[in-house]
Amino acid sequence: MEHKIKELAEAITNTHTSNLVQSHVKELKFENNHLTIYVDNAGPLHELEGEECDHHLQNGMEKVYSDITYELKLSEGGGMHERENAVPHDINQ
């Protein structure tokens, strides 16, 4: 699986988007002509969904997989936003 993620990251010409894919994508799940990309954290997920990163991601996908649809999802182990890691808070205190 890591080989497929690395292959996708290398096909992306934008350095920032490529680094996001290589650092935060944890799993690629193929079903027919559809790819689900699982990201480990909400912050990178939102960045990859943004217009600029989505454009670069789409170009990379076309190079590697040609005609395929895709969606981005938060992986099961993820869920906490990067800011919560930096400034943890407990509402029960």
Image (cartoon, helix red, strand yellow):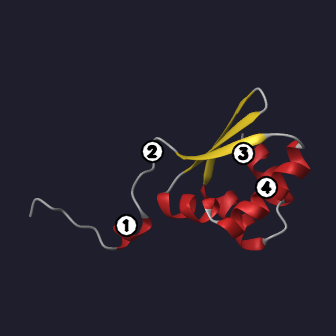
Q: Evaluate if marks 4 and 3 touch, with contact meaning CB atoms under 8 Å apart.
A: no
Residue drawn at (82%, 50%) of the image: 61
Q: Amino acid at mark 3?
A: Glu
Q: Which mark is residue 58?
A: 4
Q: Amino acid at mark 1?
A: Asn
Query: How many residues crowd mark 1 within 10 Å: few (<14), some (14–19), many (20+)?
Result: few
Q: Which mark is residue 77?
A: 2
Under tag 3, what secondary structure?
helix
Q: Which mark is residue 85?
A: 1
Q: Earlier in the sequence, mark 4 or mark 2?
A: 4
Give the label, 4 or 2, closer to the camera.
Answer: 4
Query: How far is disc 4 from disc 2 in space, using C-alphas?
Result: 25 Å
Q: Earlier in the sequence, mark 4 or mark 3?
A: 3
Q: Earlier in the sequence, mark 3 or mark 1?
A: 3
Residue 54 image position (x, y, % from top left): 71, 60
- Residue for badge 3: 2
Find residue 58 and report its image quarter: bottom right
Q: Earlier in the sequence, mark 2 or mark 1?
A: 2
Query: How far is disc 2 from disc 1 in space, using C-alphas?
Result: 14 Å
Q: Quadrant of the N terminus?
A: top right
Q: Amino acid at mark 4?
A: Gln
Q: Evaluate if marks 1 and 4 touch, with contact meaning CB atoms under 8 Å apart.
A: no
Query: How far is disc 3 from disc 1 in space, using C-alphas?
Result: 25 Å
Q: Amino acid at mark 2?
A: Gly
Residue 24 image position (x, y, % from top left): 60, 57
Under tag 4, what secondary structure?
helix
Q: Nearer the viewer, residue 7 or 48?
A: 48
Give the label, 4 or 3, closer to the camera.
Answer: 4
